[in-house]
């Protein structure tokens, strides 16, 4: 019987930039659409049906003594392939428990910093989907920003830290993943916040995020500033925490900028996107550390797996922030849009409260990469 590895163990290897060899035995079209990525990860794709008669198709590509992690969609096929490889003399083979389905749901907490007045800021990295969410804790209280669907992970983390979840915030109405915000707030008896301009069609009660109405978490102030940072959505909201950290939602990423088309309004919103990136953010301190809601490239994973960058450095290095001509910017944004996220319309409807899919359907809706950025 072959050995197995958990998604947490794989996540820590990637976060620590350990050399990692993966044999992905899913169909090639599934692999091409979405795979495990990281700064020091090498992946070979060989569909399972090519290995039914033996592992010869990969035997020459892999060292029999190196550590190899075999993965498939749900974990069953990878176990069989790992067993076959062991029989052929591969000595260090592991099957990824739960496959890509489990990988898609894994959240890895990374500490960003201790805060000035006590408490700390954490980034939860969803390596399988490129989603980033945030946990602010201070003096026995916590706020969670851009929560993923797997709310128990945040709840357990809060218990470990001995803090009570008081505030749950979404920077915007998400279209690439199902928000756990409302559920998390309901479970904890916390306040759920949403930008009102993104909430015109929601079917539930919420507390509007409004500029100037700062949110206090223990001894820490979360500045709702600038509230109006539209472009990805009409209500996209930025937060400044501890006067040091700028949470940009899906407006600005480390290597790219947000796409303005997920509500079908690219031509209308591209001007707002430019205004936010080229004017509103320009007025902020260059020393703010940008913490986005997503990342698209393995190279964006820094020390310990965190995704962050100094705002001033992004104005020097991020090509999306360096297009002087407004018409050229409009063209760059509207002509470099990647495919829409999987099931994005149903995800938006779910986040509005208009539909309530079964859990298995929710998992299926989230399959694939996030695709929230303009492609460079």
Image (spheres, rainbow, N blue to C red):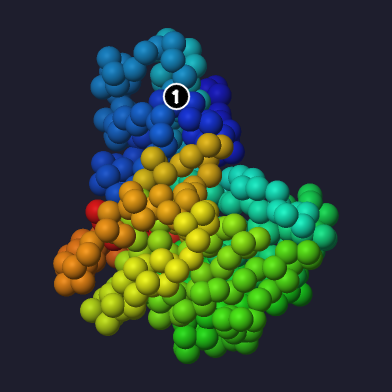
Q: Is residue 257 left or right of residue 310?
A: left
Q: Residue at x 53, y 37 (%)?
A: 303
Q: Nearer the viewer, residue 76 or 330?
A: 330
Q: Residue at x 58, y 51 (%)?
A: 124
196, above or below 20, in the image: below
56, above or below 308, in the image: above
Q: Residues within 10 Å of mark 1 (few under 14, many from 20)?
A: few
Q: Nearer the viewer, residue 297 or 151?
A: 297
Image spot of residue 8 (x, y percent): 59, 38
Q: Nearer the viewer, residue 304 or 59?
A: 304
Q: Is residue 60 left or right of residue 237?
A: left
Marker count (numbered): 1
Q: Nearer the viewer, residue 67 or 98?
A: 67
Q: Residue at x 55, y 73 (%)?
A: 225
218, above or below 99, in the image: below
Q: In terms of image quadrants, where is residue 337?
A: bottom left
Q: In terms of image quadrants, where is residue 143?
A: bottom right
Image spot of residue 367 (x, y percent): 41, 56
Q: Which residue is denoted by mark 1 in the rendering?
A: 19
Image spot of residue 371 (x, y percent): 34, 59
Give the quadrant of the N terminus.
top right
Give the quadrant of the C terminus.
bottom left
């Amino acid at each position: 019987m072959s050995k197995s590895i958990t998604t947490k163990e794989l996540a820590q290897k990637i976060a620590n930039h350990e050399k990692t060899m993966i044999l992905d035995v899913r169909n090639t079209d599934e692999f091409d659409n979405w795979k495990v990525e990281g700064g020091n990860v090498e992946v070979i794709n060989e569909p399972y049906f090519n290995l039914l008669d033996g592992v010869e198709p990969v035997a020459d590509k892999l060292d029999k003594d190196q550590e190899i992690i075999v993965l498939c969609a749900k974990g069953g096929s990878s176990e069989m392939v790992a067993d076959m490889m062991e029989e052929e003399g591969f000595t260090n083979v592991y099957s990824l428990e739960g496959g890509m389905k489990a990988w898609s749901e894994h959240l890895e907490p990374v500490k960003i910093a201790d805060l000035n007045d006590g408490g700390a800021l954490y980034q939860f990295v969803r390596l399988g989907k490129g989603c980033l969410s945030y946990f602010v804790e201070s003096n026995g209280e916590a706020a969670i920003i851009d929560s993923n669907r797997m709310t128990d992970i945040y709840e357990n983390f809060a218990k470990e830290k001995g803090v009570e979840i008081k505030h749950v915030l979404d920077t915007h109405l998400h279209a690439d993943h199902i928000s756990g915000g409302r559920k998390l707030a309901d479970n904890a008896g916390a306040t759920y916040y949403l930008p009102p301009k993104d909430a015109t069609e929601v079917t539930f009660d919420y507390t509007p995020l409004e500029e100037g109405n700062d949110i206090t978490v223990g001894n820490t102030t979360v500045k709702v500033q600038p509230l109006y940072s539209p472009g990805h959505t009409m209500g996209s909201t930025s937060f400044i925490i501890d006067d040091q950290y700028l949470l940009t939602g899906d407006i600005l990423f480390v290597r790219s900028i947000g796409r303005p088309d997920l509500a079908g309004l690219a031509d209308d919103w591209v001007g707002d996107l430019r205004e936010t990136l080229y004017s509103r953010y320009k007025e902020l301190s260059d020393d703010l550390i940008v913490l986005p809601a997503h990342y698209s490239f393995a190279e964006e994973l820094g020390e310990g797996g965190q995704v962050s960058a100094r705002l001033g450095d992004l104005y020097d290095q991020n090509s999306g922030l360096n297009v002087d001509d407004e018409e050229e910017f409009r063209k760059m944004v509207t002509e470099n849009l990647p495919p829409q996220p999987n099931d994005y319309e149903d995800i938006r409807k779910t986040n509005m409260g208009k539909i309530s899919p079964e859990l298995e359907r929710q998992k299926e809706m989230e399959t694939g990469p996030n695709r929230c950025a303009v492609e460079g």
